[in-house]
Amino acid sequence: MRDFSIKDAIILSKLLEANDIMKGERAGEFTTALAEIRESAGEIFDVQLPKLCNQLESKSGDIEDTIRDIREECSHINYHMKEAKLPADVDPWTQILKPETHE
């Protein structure tokens, strides 16, 4: 997967403007939010989940603290999803947290 940093967000913002897709501050907010989401997702999958697995396997470390860190990153992602004005049906937490209905 190609890395997507704040530097890439600036480039993408300019491309969105040049192609008349988004303008000015809106393009910048959108692309910066996506870069922040990418960073938090990387933190969860590259750092926190492997750390949690190691803690559970070795029965050592502060597992609750690691889970708290994962929740914090998820909250950060949720904030930036709203900032990027992504549609509500893109919000993965809606489906995860929605109570199951049995028919």
Image (cartoon, helix red, strand yellow):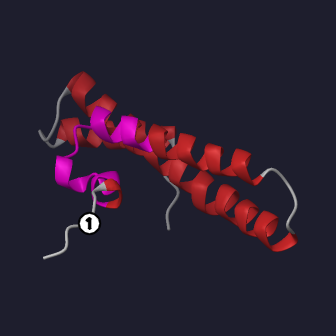
- Residue at 12% over, 76% down: 103
Which quadrant of the view contains residue 54?
bottom right
In-image side of 37 versus 87 (left or right): right
Farthest residue in the front direction? 103
In-image side of 43 versus 1 (left or right): right
Is 65 drawn above or below residue 90 in the view shown? above
Residue position marked by numbered label 1 in the rendering: 100
Packing grade of label 1 (10 A; few <14, some 14-19, many >=20) is few
Amino acid identity at mark 1 = Glu
Is residue 84 within the magenta segment? yes
Where is residue 41? Give x, y as percent. Answer: 52, 54
In-image side of 36 versus 52 (left or right): left
- Residue at 38% over, 42% down: 78
In-image side of 19 versus 6 (left or right): left
Is residue 38 within the magenta segment? no
- Residue at 17% over, 29% down: 23
Q: Which residues are magenta?
A: 77-95
Where is residue 93? Give x, y as percent. Answer: 35, 53
